[in-house]
């Protein structure tokens, strides 16, 4: 029998609810239980694929592509999911399925299209019971497909949001139907610390629990997100006003290493408390706990630092490149070093080129980021050109790889106006062009080349040194690719194809022959990087930075 654990958020967004949800799932794993996680997103987009990363954070890509069939005769491909799925995968070492991301868009689409094909003949279609029924059905479909011991369901947004109402109502109904002891509700709220009075303030938490209660939901556990550990008196006050026992009020303090959160929860007794209310009679697997402690130690014991510059276009918020940030951290930890990341908004190239070049120069390595569209793109190409000319270690991801190829074509092949047709559709030298199968594609949602694909890695390349395997699977999210017509001439001038698809037709990675560590990959290795298993490419990139740094220090 599946136990359902719901996680809602209160007071403000951006509390790190995804990390909390993943950490709670980890507590079940510490007890040898199987877990699965659902994220319910109240926005009306069908999937986050068309959202701007500055507004919503990174779009995560799963291994699998899901053929979503909202009603007979209608099909949509979904592989792009909320960034929280990256957190779940990293914490739980589990490949998540795209159908675990339930959006309001999907729910309404299903109900409305089914009404059109006549599934509800004679009935008035309403939020209750049809929308709520569809939400419950989607949750139960995940429970049935994977049959986990515990299914965590994170609700996006903040309680009180109008669009989240049907989700809360569905939870209320589901809790009633599943019965006492089979569900738990965890509410994550902000407990601000007011410097002027030197106190934690509980009122926002009290208010947000009241909002939940007015939807018929009483939380079992309250997790207080705060600057530091909540004091005993604050926990007692929250317990009293929010109607939960004091041991069910848990601290979620700021942490340097997020992977420590499951251990913080465990030491507060959250794992045992949850199992008690869910009537799960299981003991703790000390080995699993110890293994996780060792993972955390890797991150706390890293010493010294290397500086990676990330030129790109979505530099306003950290979350836009969250999987890349994490992959760099993983690679750093396994090299025993911290990675200092600096984002560079490449529009700076047009505004203040001196500052732009200073930043490139002061970095130990450059990671050219993924992206879409033409804003800031000349600065990104210039960053790649700088790496080529100045022998700066360089890793280009997807768009970053395409722009490296453009920089190479301009700088080395002498094609001054080489470009991608994404940026300049009329370019004389389309060195990056639409994938053949994309030429007749008119619709933008879920139609890119998505999901995991096999990649053939060529021997005697730096990429092979990184992977030590001729066949790997990595995830893709692109519409354009390196134009094979330009590859031959590039190969004569010092560029090497280091990976293709299995047929050997599509170029999946390039590098510069010789000592320069300059690699571009058409895929997104960051999506499969885990805190205990860094991505081989990222690991090699950081290892190169460390090696150069210590060689440089040796010289001095
Ligand atoms: N815009 C490019 C493409 O569609 C790169 C996409 C990306 O970086 N994910 O191919």
Image: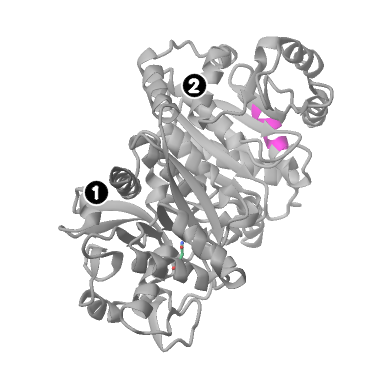
Q: Which residues are magenta?
A: 168-175
In percent of the image, x 55 and y 73: which residue is there?
A: 374
Q: Give whichever of discs 2 and 1 has the lower sequence position.
A: 2
Q: Position of residue 208 (x, y in %)?
A: 79, 30
Camera-side residue of 145 and 27: 27
- Taking the image as shown, residue 377 lies to the left or right of residue 502, namely right
The Cα–Cα distance between marks 2 and 1, rounded to whole angstroms, is 32 Å
- Disc 2 crowd, CA 10 A, few/some/many (<14, 14-19, 20+): many
Query: Which residue occupies the foreground of this view, 134 or 89?
Result: 89
Residue 254, position as x, y percentages in the image: 61, 29
Question: Compared to 212, does 276 lie above or below?
Answer: above
Q: Is residue 364 visible?
A: yes
For residue 325, the mark is none
Q: Dot 1, how many residues are within 10 Å of its Cα: few (below 14), some (14-19), or many (20+)? A: some
| Residue annotated with mark 1 | 467
Mark 1 element type: helix
From what the image shows, is residue 422 above or below residue 449? below
Residue located beneath label 2 in the image? 27
Determine the residue located farthest toward the front in the rendered image: 556
Q: Is residue 54 left or right of residue 64?
A: right
Which residue is outermost to the left?
460
């Amino acid at each position: 029998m599946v136990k359902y654990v719901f996680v809602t958020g209160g007071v403000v967004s951006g509390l790190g609810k995804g990390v909390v949800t993943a950490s709670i799932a980890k507590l079940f794993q510490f007890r040898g239980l199987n877990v699965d996680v659902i994220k319910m997103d109240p926005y009306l987009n069908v999937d986050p694929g068309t959202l701007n990363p500055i507004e919503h954070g990174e779009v995560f890509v799963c291994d699998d592509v899901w053929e979503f069939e909202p009603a007979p005769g209608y099909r949509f491909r979904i592989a792009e999911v909320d960034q929280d799925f990256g957190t779940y995968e990293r914490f739980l070492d589990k490949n998540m399925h795209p159908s675990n991301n339930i959006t309001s868009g999907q729910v309404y689409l299903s109900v409305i299209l089914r009404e059109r094909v006549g599934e509800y003949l004679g009935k008035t279609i309403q939020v209750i019971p049809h929308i709520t029924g569809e939400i419950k059905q989607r949750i139960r479909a995940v429970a049935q497909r994977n049959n986990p011991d515990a299914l965590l369901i994170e609700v996006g947004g903040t309680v009180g949001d109008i669009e989240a109402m049907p989700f809360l109502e569905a939870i209320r109904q589901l809790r009633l139907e599943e019965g006492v002891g089979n569900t738990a509700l965890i509410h994550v709220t902000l407990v601000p610390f007011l410097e002027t009075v030197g106190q934690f303030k509980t009122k926002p938490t009290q208010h947000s629990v009241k909002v939940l209660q007015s939807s018929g939901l009483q939380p079992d556990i309250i997790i207080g997100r705060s600057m530091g550990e909540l004091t005993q008196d604050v926990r007692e006050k929250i317990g009293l006003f929010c109607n939960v026992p004091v041991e069910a009020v848990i601290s979620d303090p700021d942490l340097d290493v997020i992977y420590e959160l499951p251990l913080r929860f465990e030491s507060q007794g959250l794992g045992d408390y949850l199992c008690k209310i869910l009537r799960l009679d299981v003991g703790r697997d000390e080995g699993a706990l110890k293994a996780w402690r060792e993972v955390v130690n890797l991150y706390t014991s890293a010493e010294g630092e290397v500086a990676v510059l990330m030129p790109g276009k979505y530099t306003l918020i950290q979350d836009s490149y969250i999987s890349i940030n994490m992959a760099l951290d993983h690679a750093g930890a396994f090299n025993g070093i911290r990675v200092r990341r600096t984002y560079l908004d490449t529009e700076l190239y047009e505004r203040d080129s001196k500052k732009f070049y200073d930043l490139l120069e002061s970095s130990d390595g450059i990671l050219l980021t993924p992206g879409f569209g033409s804003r800031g793109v000349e600065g990104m190409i210039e960053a790649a050109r700088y790496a080529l000319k100045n022998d700066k270690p360089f890793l280009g991801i997807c768009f970053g790889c395409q722009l490296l190829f453009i920089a190479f074509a301009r700088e080395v092949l002498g094609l001054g106006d080489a470009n991608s047709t994404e940026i300049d559709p009329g370019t004389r030298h389309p060195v990056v062009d639409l994938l053949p199968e994309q030429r007749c594609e008119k619709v933008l949602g879920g139609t890119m080349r998505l999901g995991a694909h096999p990649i053939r890695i060529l021997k005697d390349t730096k990429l092979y040194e990184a992977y030590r395997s001729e066949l790997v699977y990595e995830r893709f999210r692109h519409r354009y690719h390196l134009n094979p017509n330009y590859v031959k001439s590039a190969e004569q001038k010092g560029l090497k194809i280091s990976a293709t698809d299995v047929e050997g037709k599509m170029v999946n990675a390039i590098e510069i022959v010789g000592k320069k560590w300059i690699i571009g990959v058409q895929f997104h290795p960051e999506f499969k990087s885990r805190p205990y298993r860094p991505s081989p490419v990222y690991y090699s990139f950081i290892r190169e930075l460390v090696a150069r740094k210590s060689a440089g220090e040796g010289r001095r």
